[in-house]
Structure formats: C-alpha cells, structure tokens
Image (tube, helix red, strand yellow):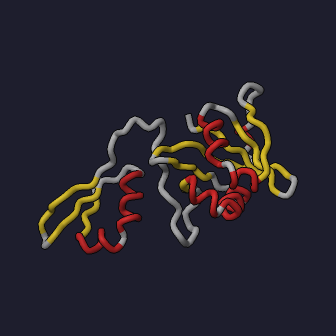
Amino acid sequence: MREVIGLTQLRSDACTYLERVAAGETIGIVRRGKLVARMSPVGDGRGAPIPPRSVKDGSEPGGWVGLDELRKRAGRCFDRVAAGETIYVVRGGRLLARIVSVDDSGMAPGPTDRGGEIDLDELRKRAGRYFDRVEAGQTIEVRRGGKVVARIVSVA
C-alpha cells in the first residue's frame, strides 16, 4: 500500500521522500485533506534501480553516494566498504557502479575486465576518468595505505 503524506511533510523532508520514490515507492501527497498529487518512479531505462540511500544514523547497510560526494568523503565511504557494506555510485541520476570489499568472495575480476589499481587519493582527484572506465566494463581496485581495500565494478 502506498503512503500518503501532507504537503508540509514533503516540504520539510523532500530529499528523503524523493530518495524513497527513486527506490521504487509511490507516495501520495495531500493538501487540506485532499489528495492532490502522486509521486512515483519514472521508467528511464536505467540498467538497475538505484538502491535506497543510507539513513544518517548508519542503521541501514549499504546505500548510494553521488560521484561529487564520493570525492569529498572518500575516506568515510571506503571505511563503510571495509566494514562490509556495498556502496552504489550515482552520476547524473544514473546508477554507475558499485564499490565492494575485496573480501567479497564473488567479486574476483576476470582477466579481460581488470582496470588496474589506484590509490584512494588518485581516485579523489580523477574520479570521473576512473568511473568512465568502470562504466566501460573495467574493474578497478582501490589501495589505501598500500593495501587493496575495495573494488569498483560496473553495475551493467
């Protein structure tokens, strides 16, 4: 059953509701007790749906991060990956890649899709370039402190 919220609720927490809609929910909006609108996800041909964004208290595992936000908060993101979460990267409203722990047993890259290793600082500086390579099907391993800590893989 879809949720119905008031216009004031939508105004006060619009980002949360938009994230839920992007994740596949439909939400009705009421003004003065009357249903005036319905927010629902659009079918834009994405290869995979964008997963729900993590909540601020960290109680929900995984989630997504925008490419610009990844540049600013790369350390935190890779700490979460090291703790076992999978983080999805979004660019331009489109699901681009996922970042997984190297300990994730099912994620060994094949010989043809290996895109090399990079340091976390290098990823911060040239994230767009590396995510273009991932989007083209390569897998990139990320080093932190000289140790490979994560893989960035395409969602396609």
Which percent across, then down, holds residue 132? 61, 38
Q: How many marks?
A: 0
Q: Quadrant of the C terminus?
A: top right
- Residue at image location 52% in from the left, 49% down from the top: 90
Instruction: Reply above or below: 19 against 140.
Output: below
Q: Is residue 103 visible?
A: no
| Position of residue 22 measured from the top left corner of the image (x, y, whole percent) | 39, 51
- In the image: residue 22, left or right of residue 27: right
Residue 45 image offset from top left, x and y in percent: 40, 35
Residue displayed at 65% across by 42% down: 129
The answer to whether residue 103 is above or below residue 17 is above
Which residue is more in the foreground, 110 or 128?
128
| Drawn side of residue 87 relative to residue 148, left or right | left
Tell whether 128 sits left or right of 116: left
Locate the N terminus by quadrant: bottom left
Q: Residue at x 53, y 70 (%)?
A: 56
Examine the image and state in which quarter residue 120 appears.
bottom right
Residue at left offset 64%, top offset 63%: 73
